[in-house]
Image (tube, rainbow, N blue to C red):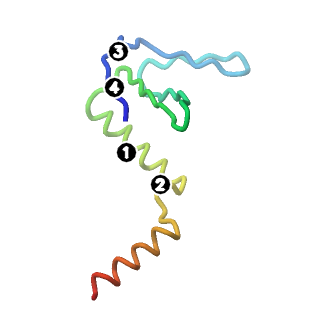
Amino acid sequence: MGKIEPEKEIKKVVICYEDGEKKEVEKGFFCEMQPEDECLNLTFHMFQVEGKELVCIIEGMMELGDRLGMFSPTKETQEGEEGNRERKRS
């Protein structure tokens, strides 16, 4: 996991769409991805975000992961849990 470094204050982000439309975002969060060898380095940028809003962002990302099925148990996980339950009964 990377380290948190102080950054310059972000004033706004401009999103440029393929059709030429632009949108200015003055408050938000985005994640920059930089592939390195066998891993992906993530840099999180937040601007004009306050404490409780950060909680909302994290909860929203967890909800997204859940909706995408990322937290559904895999067959291996289910088999491992069944094995753990059997060992606990012994």
- Please give the name of the residue rendered at 48% of the width and 31% of the height, measured from the top-left corner: 41
Which mark, residue 66? 2
Q: Which residue is mark 3?
A: 7
State the separation of the CA atoms marked 2 and 3.
31 Å
- Asked if disc 2 and disc 4 are in contact, CB closer than 8 Å, the reply is no
State the separation of the CA atoms marked 3 and 1.
24 Å
Residue lying furthest right:
19
State the separation of the CA atoms marked 4 and 1.
14 Å
Q: Which residue is mark 4?
A: 49
Which mark, residue 59? 1
Is residue 77 shown above or below 52? Answer: below
State the separation of the CA atoms marked 3 and 4.
14 Å
Place of residue 54 in the rendered image (x, y in percent of width and height, measured from the top left): 32, 34
Q: Nearer the viewer, mark 3 or mark 1?
A: 3
Dot 1, how many residues are within 10 Å of its Cα: few (below 14), some (14-19), or many (20+)? few
- Dot 3 or dot 1: first in sequence order is 3
Dot 4, how many residues are within 10 Å of its Cα: few (below 14), some (14-19), or many (20+)? some
Q: Amino acid at mark 3?
A: Glu
Residue lying furthest bottom:
90
Q: Nearer the viewer, mark 3 or mark 4?
A: 3
The local secondary structure at tag 2 comes to helix
The local secondary structure at tag 1 comes to helix
- Asked if disc 3 and disc 4 are in contact, CB closer than 8 Å, the reply is no
Residue lying furthest front:
37
Tell me if 47 is positioned left or right of 13 in this view.
left
- Dot 2 or dot 1: first in sequence order is 1
Query: Which quadrant would residue 82 be assigned to in this image?
Result: bottom left
The local secondary structure at tag 3 comes to loop
- Dot 2 or dot 3: first in sequence order is 3
